[in-house]
């Protein structure tokens, strides 16, 4: 089952399918954790050079690692720093009504798309990290070679996601594709088998159709 939100950021044209379906967020929860940590850094309540709690990295280092390579240790450390489910009421008040950082972490395609939209609009440091993404096995292979994209993936048993902003010849396309449940043992980026290839290629096909519609 696919939950999809696609927005042409030039015209505002929007397409949505099951965008409010609440699913296990997999590593997409790291977007919401990073967003809050950057807010705390700006407020002075968290310092970039303080220990993150993962035993190896500072907060600043973990922010990069949890987004650019989807480091799980840094993600868990970030979850603990923001208080896990204690952050949920603030997220809901801020417009992310389908997102929960309490265990198990959950979200919606609409919430992920809105977070990415806000970060793109503000051209934030978090958005800059999305531009540096190194996990590029879902949307990017389906696009014309060299197409710029700022995005974040998520995967765990049963679920595979990708979301971000694609630069097209006519402007920018915001897309969030959250998929599952898939049969076990799918889906894990670190061990690609037949089920992962199927799931990741399906995400790519959806993204390419949206790209071709607006390009």
Image (spheres, rainbow, N blue to C red):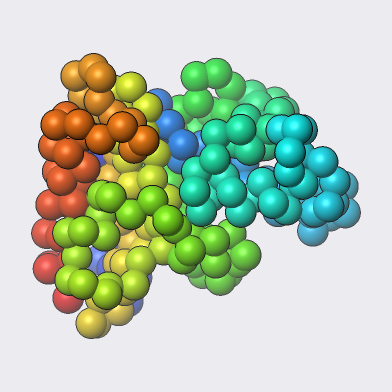
In this orientation, which residue lies closer to the viewer: 28 or 14? Answer: 28
Q: How many marks?
A: 0
Asked whether, in this view, residue 34 is left or right of residue 205, the answer is right
Against 106, is 104 above or below? above
In this orientation, which residue lies closer to the viewer: 128 or 108? Answer: 128
Report the residue at 69% width, 51% height from top: 61
- Horizontal and vertical percent position of residue 180: 24, 28
- Horizontal and vertical percent position of residue 133: 44, 58
Against 152, is 198 above or below? above
The quadrant of the image that shows the C terminus is bottom left
Asked whether, in this view, residue 154 is left or right of residue 50, the answer is left
Quarter of the image holding residue 147?
A: bottom left
Report the residue at 73% width, 53% height from top: 60
Quarter of the image holding residue 153?
A: top left
In this orientation, which residue lies closer to the viewer: 61 or 115? Answer: 61
Report the residue at 28% width, 45% height from top: 177
Quarter of the image holding residue 143?
A: bottom left
Against 63, is 193 above or below? above
One can see residue 27 in this view: yes
Report the residue at 50% width, 26% height from top: 105
- Horizontal and vertical percent position of residue 20: 34, 36
The quadrant of the image that shows the N terminus is top left
- Horizontal and vertical percent position of residue 89: 64, 30
Asked whether, in this view, residue 163 is left or right of residue 198, the answer is right
């Amino acid at each position: 089952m696919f939950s999809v939100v696609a927005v042409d950021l030039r015209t505002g044209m929007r397409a949505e399918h099951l965008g409010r379906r609440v699913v296990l967020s997999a590593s997409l929860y790291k977007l919401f954790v990073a967003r809050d940590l950057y807010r705390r850094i700006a407020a002075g309540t968290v310092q970039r050079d303080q220990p993150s709690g993962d035993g190896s990295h500072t907060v600043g280092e973990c922010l990069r690692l949890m987004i650019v390579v989807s480091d799980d240790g840094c993600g868990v450390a970030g979850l603990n720093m923001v208080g896990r489910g204690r952050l949920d009421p603030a997220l809901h008040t801020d417009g992310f009504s389908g997102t929960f950082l309490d265990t198990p972490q959950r979200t919606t395609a609409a919430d992920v798309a809105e977070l990415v939209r806000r970060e793109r609009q503000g051209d934030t440091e978090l958005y800059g990290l999305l531009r540096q993404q190194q996990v590029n096995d879902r949307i990017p292979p389906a696009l014309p070679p060299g197409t710029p994209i700022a995005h974040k993936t998520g995967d765990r048993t049963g679920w595979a996601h990708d979301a971000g902003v694609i630069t097209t010849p006519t402007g920018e396309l915001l897309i969030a594709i959250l998929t599952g449940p898939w049969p076990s043992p799918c889906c894990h980026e670190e061990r690609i088998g037949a089920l992962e290839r199927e799931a990741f290629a399906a995400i790519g096909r959806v993204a390419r159709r949206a790209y071709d519609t607006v390009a």
